[in-house]
């Protein structure tokens, strides 16, 4: 027998249900309130938790004890209504489906997928098996079997497909039966066919207004069985609406399509994007906070993407929240770790390794095992330098032996591979339950002994799932992951499919990322609930964010595998049921709360446009039109919300706080390189960062040589050519061969074969440029010019770095103080017949010296912006060149992208310009001595330091990094 009781919707249903329980099953004279004989069924887990709190609070207020009823969700109920073999887990069902699909005839599979996976593609078969499991669930929920669907097919193609599905179903059920398992959907349908559904305990259905046809059929048998106990349905509606529900409190969807909601315009709040929506939430909380306590207010969300922005906004303003939706492992450090491990195992590249070692737990693990580099910044810096200079690809291929960072990088790779060796070295497929144990051992090694306490004592025990406030978020995530891995370790051996390690880890990581845990709520926190939990919440004040399509009602499309007629029918039925469910829920929110507000945004968290919900049309046409028009055209009045906290003792100017740190008074340098002058002219502060503090950005993200690195590549080949036997050759073919040989030697030394494809293409580009250089060099040699020296240098030291002989220090003495100067010269040419000298600097652009050194001003005059060649002229006496510096030619050997621009361009500066350059050199030296390092207010064209404020990592350069520029 079923009793349907209508409790009205002017009070929260849980409060009304509590009162009904007291009246019908209240405490006896002994004071013991015994409800343990009842089964209470709710739509969600949150409703169970809240009812438990209400029952305990009621008993405590009356100074009574209470024996709680057994409380179930709608999803748990079917298994309580029949006797069956052990039900297969969801993943066991997927495994069985994957196995029968892989064993099916390939031609037959074409009705399911046009290109079936390869026989050994276990991950693809598992994904396909998951698709079939979900299809089966959706059909069974309608009380249908595959054979029923076959009878509904209209076309020959649909009949062929579903006949194949019927055959697959037989094979699938046989697989489960062989493993001693039962498909829960088929077991429930079989129980209905055999009239075997029973209830041995009284059932109380509370707010179960949207249950599947399958469950309705099962309850129908329970209702008619003389062996079953009574069913009571508690409905959130007045008795006058009884025709809109069946006897189990399930909605008659068709009767709700024309229902008008008692929604007032003042309860709707227009908002823009997600940032504006969160601001509107805070504005509403400020209003509600004047009347209600924190524990009397609930924030509702219609899409999970709204949760984090709302939490962040609340946190900024000092408002604590509790996320009842729970935290996903995928959003924690553990989830990120699993993603990084999967990527590294699949790609085996240095970039995937670099990403993995940057995970905080892996960084700590590596640092503890590198005794000579206990600080992570040192070995991480070396790894970044390797990636940004050699651009290596595969970790399984050798690195360039002469690259300084190779040894450290190899040690890091070896260390990681040893840690992950059970996944890397075990190349043979193994059952997933064994991979689960392997992965658990890997996580335990990484997190140390402390992680041992997080292992479940009894994976099936509910006590193990209770939150522990003493645990960090990472520890909570680890505990949830260990429980999942224990369940996988108990997979049926006959269903468990052997797979490769990388496939198993990817599959396990994917399922780990969806695991959730919920923290303990606190009375000082505002509850954050999803839309489906709001109807059974009992807080007097509510603000709902996102009353928009496609969130409410949730949009759903039909399954493409279903026959067209059935797909249309089920799609319409599902949409009608969702609409009815949400109209009924909103009716409860509007009539059972003292205060409720609905925010209607314009865009979702990902920026997609979101029109107002169809629920706003649950009114007269005139009201609906006016309502939507007002939402779209009338902005809400905004207020500024500030946290309730004392102001800081010292006010902080945000412009000062976020400004780059000022130069340290009195800190400067005594020796300047040639390029330091142009850096100072561009921006004294950036000069200070690079040349005084010796900071430079280090970026390991590029996949190709930067402009300066490409220049080094070309310079390296030209430098070695200038030292070789063919440096004065006049045959362009021989010159070309020598240049290309040196180019590839340089590339092999610095990049090796294990480098990115882009770098290899750039080497080919450099080779093309050098072919043109060979022609120009042959012409110059034929004209009588000889390469006298390459990479000659001057510096401030008194001993020559190569010969070891005493020499004159290079520098400038001003105001009685010596400042050292240093420079390196790409090439010095000499013409024996004429006695002329030339100093040339290789450039991989096509500009002439005048363009790079002088900037034209609006009045037509010029201004020095680069002092390289004027400085070279000052160094001529220190180079041992027996000539008047005025007579020495200065210029560029342009190795340009365009063949027509690859040539020698000599500088044509006037004496007056050289004199101005000398004055500017003196000015720069004096300013640098005086520590004048003010930033250039106009910035610079190419800024290495634009990310200075916490957007990049700056590392100190080694002493010899800047040696000669």
Image (cartoon, helix red, strand yellow):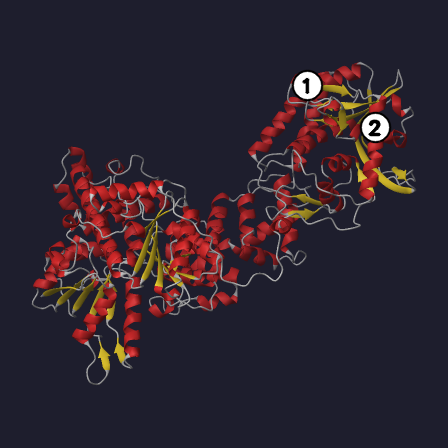
Q: Nearer the viewer, residue 927 or 388?
A: 927
Q: Is disc 1 placed on a helix, strand or loop?
A: helix
For the residues marked 2 and 1, what is the alpha-carbon distance in whole angstroms? 29 Å
Q: Where in the figure is residue 259, as x and y percent of width and height?
A: 18, 49
Crowdedness near tag 1: few (<14), some (14–19) or many (≥20) residues, C-alpha within 10 Å: some
Q: State the quadrant of the C terminus.
A: top right
> Vertical placement of 230 versus 629: above or below?
below
Q: Nearer the viewer, residue 842 or 254?
A: 254
List the residue tagged with mark 2. 916
Q: Is disc 2 placed on a helix, strand or loop?
A: helix
Picture quadrant of residue 832: top right
Q: Residue at x 79, y 17 (%)?
A: 781
Q: Which residue, as the protein is rendered here, is positioned at the far bottom? A: 30
Q: Which mark is residue 809?
A: none
Query: Is the C-beta separation of discs 2 and 1 under 8 Å?
Result: no
> Vertical placement of 548 versus 591: above or below?
above
In the rendered structure, the answer to whether residue 547 lies left or right of residue 756 reads left
Q: Where in the figure is residue 97, as x and y percent of width and height?
A: 27, 48
List the residue tagged with mark 1. 901
Q: Where in the figure is residue 138, as x and y percent of width and height?
A: 22, 48
Q: Nearer the viewer, residue 37 or 209?
A: 209
Q: Where in the figure is residue 561, as x and y percent of width and height?
A: 23, 40
Would you say residue 801 is visible in this rendering?
no
Crowdedness near tag 2: few (<14), some (14–19) or many (≥20) residues, C-alpha within 10 Å: some
Picture quadrant of residue 742: top right
């Amino acid at each position: 027998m079923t009793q349907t009781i209508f409790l009205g919707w002017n009070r929260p249903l849980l409060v009304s249900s509590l009162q009904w329980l007291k009246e019908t099953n209240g405490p006896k004279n002994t004071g013991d309130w015994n409800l343990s004989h009842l089964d209470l069924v709710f739509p969600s887990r949150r409703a169970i938790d809240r009812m438990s709190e209400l029952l305990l609070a009621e008993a405590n207020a009356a100074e009574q004890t209470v024996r709680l009823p057994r409380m179930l969700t709608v999803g748990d109920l079917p298994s309580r209504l029949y006797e069956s073999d052990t039900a297969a887990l969801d993943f066991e069902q997927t495994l069985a489906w994957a196995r029968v699909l892989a064993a099916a005839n390939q031609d037959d599979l074409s009705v399911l997928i046009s290109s079936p996976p390869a026989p050994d593609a276990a991950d693809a078969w598992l994904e396909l098996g998951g698709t079939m499991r979900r299809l089966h669930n959706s059909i069974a929920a309608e009380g249908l079997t595959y054979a029923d669907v076959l009878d509904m097919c209209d076309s020959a193609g649909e009949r062929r497909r579903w006949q194949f599905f019927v055959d697959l179903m037989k094979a699938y059920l046989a697989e489960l039966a062989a493993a001693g398992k039962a498909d829960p959907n088929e077991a429930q349908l079989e129980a209905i066919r055999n009239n075997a559904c029973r209830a041995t305990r009284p059932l109380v259905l509370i707010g179960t207004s949207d249950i599947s046809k399958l469950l309705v059929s099962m309850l129908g048998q329970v209702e008619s069985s003389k062996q079953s106990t009574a069913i009571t349905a508690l409905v959130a509606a007045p008795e006058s609406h009884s025709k809109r529900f069946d006897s189990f409190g399930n909605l008659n969807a068709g009767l709700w399509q024309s229902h008008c909601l008692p929604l007032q315009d003042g309860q709707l709040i227009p908002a823009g994007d997600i940032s504006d929506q969160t601001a509107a939430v805070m504005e509403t909380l400020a209003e509600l906070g004047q009347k209600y306590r924190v524990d009397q207010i609930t924030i509702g969300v219609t899409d999970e993407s709204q949760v984090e922005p709302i939490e962040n906004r609340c946190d900024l303003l000092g408002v604590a929240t509790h996320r009842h939706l729970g935290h996903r492992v995928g959003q924690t450090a553990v989830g990120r770790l699993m993603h990084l491990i999967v990527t590294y195992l699949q790609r085996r590249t240095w970039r995937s390794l670099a990403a993995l070692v940057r995970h905080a737990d892996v960084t700590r693990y590596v640092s503890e095992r590198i005794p000579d580099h206990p600080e992570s910044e040192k070995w991480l810096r070396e790894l970044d330098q390797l990636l940004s200079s050699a651009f290596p690809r595969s970790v399984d291929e050798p690195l360039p032996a002469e690259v300084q960072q190779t040894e450290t990088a190899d040690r890091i790779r070896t260390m990681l591979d040893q840690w992950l060796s059970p996944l890397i070295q075990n190349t043979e497929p193994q059952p997933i339950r064994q991979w689960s144990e392997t992965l658990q051992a890997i996580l335990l090694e990484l997190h140390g002994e402390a992680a041992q306490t997080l292992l479940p004592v009894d994976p099936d025990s509910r006590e193990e799932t209770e939150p522990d406030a003493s645990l960090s978020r990472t520890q909570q995530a680890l505990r949830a992951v260990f429980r999942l891995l224990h369940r996988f370790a108990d997979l049926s051996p006959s269903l468990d499919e052997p797979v490769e390690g990388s496939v198993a880890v990817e599959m396990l990581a994917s399922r780990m990322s969806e695991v959730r845990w919920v923290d303990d709520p606190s009375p000082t926190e505002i509850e954050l609930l999803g839309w489906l939990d709001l109807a059974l919440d009992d807080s007097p004040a509510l603000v709902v964010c996102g009353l928009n399509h496609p969130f409410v009602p949730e949009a759903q499309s039909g399954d493409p595998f279903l026959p067209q007629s059935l797909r249309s029918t089920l799609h319409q039925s599902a949409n009608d049921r969702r609409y009815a469910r949400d109209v009924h829920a909103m009716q409860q929110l509007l009539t059972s709360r003292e205060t409720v507000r609905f925010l209607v945004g314009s865009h979702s968290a990902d920026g997609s446009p979101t029109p107002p919900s169809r629920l706003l049309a649950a009114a007269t046409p005139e009201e609906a039109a006016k309502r939507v028009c007002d939402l779209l055209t009338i902005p809400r009045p905004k207020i500024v919300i500030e946290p309730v906290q004392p102001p800081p003792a010292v006010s902080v100017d945000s412009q000062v706080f976020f400004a780059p740190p000022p130069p340290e008074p009195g800190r400067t340098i005594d020796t300047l390189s040639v390029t330091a002058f142009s850096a100072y002219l561009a921006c004294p502060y950036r000069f200070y960062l690079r040349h005084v503090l010796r900071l430079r950005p280090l970026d390991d993200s590029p996949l190709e040589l930067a402009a300066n690195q490409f220049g080094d590549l070309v310079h390296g080949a030209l430098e070695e050519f200038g030292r070789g036997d063919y440096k004065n050759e006049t045959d362009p073919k021989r010159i070309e061969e020598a240049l290309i040989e040196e180019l590839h030697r340089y590339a092999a030394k610095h990049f090796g074969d294990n480098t990115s494809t882009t770098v290899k293409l750039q080497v080919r580009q450099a080779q093309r440029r050098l072919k043109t250089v060979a022609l120009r060099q042959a012409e110059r040699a034929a004209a009588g010019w000889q390469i006298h020296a390459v990479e000659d240098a001057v510096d401030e030291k008194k001993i020559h770095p190569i010969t070891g002989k005493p020499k004159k220090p290079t520098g400038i003495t001003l105001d009685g103080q010596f400042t050292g100067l240093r420079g390196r010269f790409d090439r010095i040419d000499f013409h024996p017949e004429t006695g002329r000298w030339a100093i040339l600097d290789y450039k991989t652009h096509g500009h002439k010296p005048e363009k790079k050194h002088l900037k034209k001003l609006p009045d037509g005059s010029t201004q020095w912006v680069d002092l390289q060649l004027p400085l070279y002229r000052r160094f001529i006496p220190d180079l041992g060149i027996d000539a008047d510096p005025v007579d020495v030619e200065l210029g560029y050997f342009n190795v340009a992208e365009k063949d027509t621009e690859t040539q020698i361009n000599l500088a044509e500066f006037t004496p007056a310009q050289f004199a101005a350059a000398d004055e500017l050199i003196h000015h720069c030296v004096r300013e640098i001595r005086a520590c004048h390092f003010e930033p250039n207010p106009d910035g610079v064209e190419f800024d290495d330091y634009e990310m200075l404020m916490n957007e990049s990592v700056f590392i100190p350069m080694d002493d010899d990094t800047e040696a000669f520029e």
